[in-house]
Image (spheres, rainbow, N blue to C red):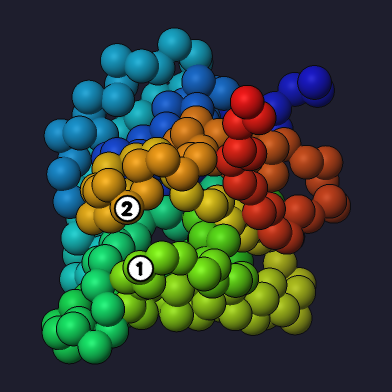
Amino acid sequence: MSKFYWRNKVAVITGASVGIGASTAVTLANAGMVVVGLARRSELIEALKEQVTGEGKIFARQCDLSDERQLTETFNWIQERFHCIHVLVCNAGILKANFLSESPTKDIKELFDLNVVATACCLRESLKHMAAIKVRGHIVVINSVLGHRIPEVPVPLFSVYPATKHAITALCQTVRQEIHFLKLNIKLTSICPGMVDTDFLNVYSQAVAELPKLQAQDVAKAVLYALDTPDGVQVEDIILQQMRKIE
């Protein structure tokens, strides 16, 4: 493999405290990047530093992305402290397992506020910054296979979660067009995993216990793959699923 272009460059990862975000933070730090992890539980990001064996570093910043004031202040702080955002990984999201017919309005709004509105705001802040300093950038959005298709399942406790991911699929396509129109040197990759074995699935408990699941590290490797493509080559979508074991 050729020398990793993003070595010593700054990656901002939302939802970096656990699961896919935490695994991606460690993977990119071990590839030599300066990683700024954002989450409400920043102490969990601090603990990830022990797993860094490469040349990179992990910095933690407490931030509730559903609070726009905190979000904009955090991105301003990143620009002041690190001067540049080269890579953004939008990973933060929530899942509330329920029937729509039993979902309170509060839950519906929370799902859209974090999964869609906060993601759009993170994209906005990063794009403004990358455009202003004319940096070569890469945006990775952790989407879901549910942003493309919704499988038939025995108990469909999806509520509006797949709707938020379909919104993200559309958002990636429109932002990609905007990047092209504004003549920015920024790639945008949507990564759509199937079921991943993280705490995220606790809401489904036994319902998914026997189903094949990816590991968070599998998704982190997909992020690294997208980043490591040659200049001028953009991987737009990656859909990955765990294969069923053949007995």
Question: Residue 79: where, in percent of width, then height?
Answer: 39, 53
For residue 88, say whether it is visible: no
Percent from the top left, x then y, of residue 239? Answer: 66, 54
Q: Amino acid at mark 2?
A: Ala
Which percent across, then down, holds residue 223? 59, 42
**Residue 246 quadrant:** top right
Q: How many marks?
A: 2
Q: Determine contact: label 2, label 1, CB under 8 Å.
A: yes
What SS does tag 1 mark? loop
Residue drawn at (17%, 51%), measured in percent from left and top?
Answer: 40
Q: Residue at 59% of width from left, 80% of height from top?
A: 170
Q: Is residue 92 above or below residue 216?
A: below
Please say if 101 is above or below 175.
Answer: below
Q: In the drawing, does residue 54 fall left or right of residue 174?
A: left
Q: Nearer the viewer, residue 193 or 235?
A: 193
| Residue tagged 2 | 207
Q: Quadrant of the C terminus?
A: top right
Lower sequence index among marks 2 and 1: 1
> Type of residue at label 1?
Val
Furthest-front residue in this view: 247
Q: Which residue is mark 1?
A: 155
Q: Is residue 11 shown to the viewer in this render?
A: yes
The location of residue 99, given as percent across then percent down, is: 27, 78
Question: Is residue 144 or residue 84 the one in the foreground?
Answer: 144
Residue visible at 45% across and 73% down in the picture: 162
Count neighbours of disc 2 (C-alpha within 10 A) and say few if under 14, some if 14 to 19, many if 20 or more.
Answer: few
Residue closer to the observer: 188 or 36: 188
Q: Residues within 10 Å of mark 1 (few under 14, many from 20)?
A: few
Residue 130, picture quadrant:
bottom right
Q: Quadrant of residue 37?
A: top left
SS state under label 2: helix
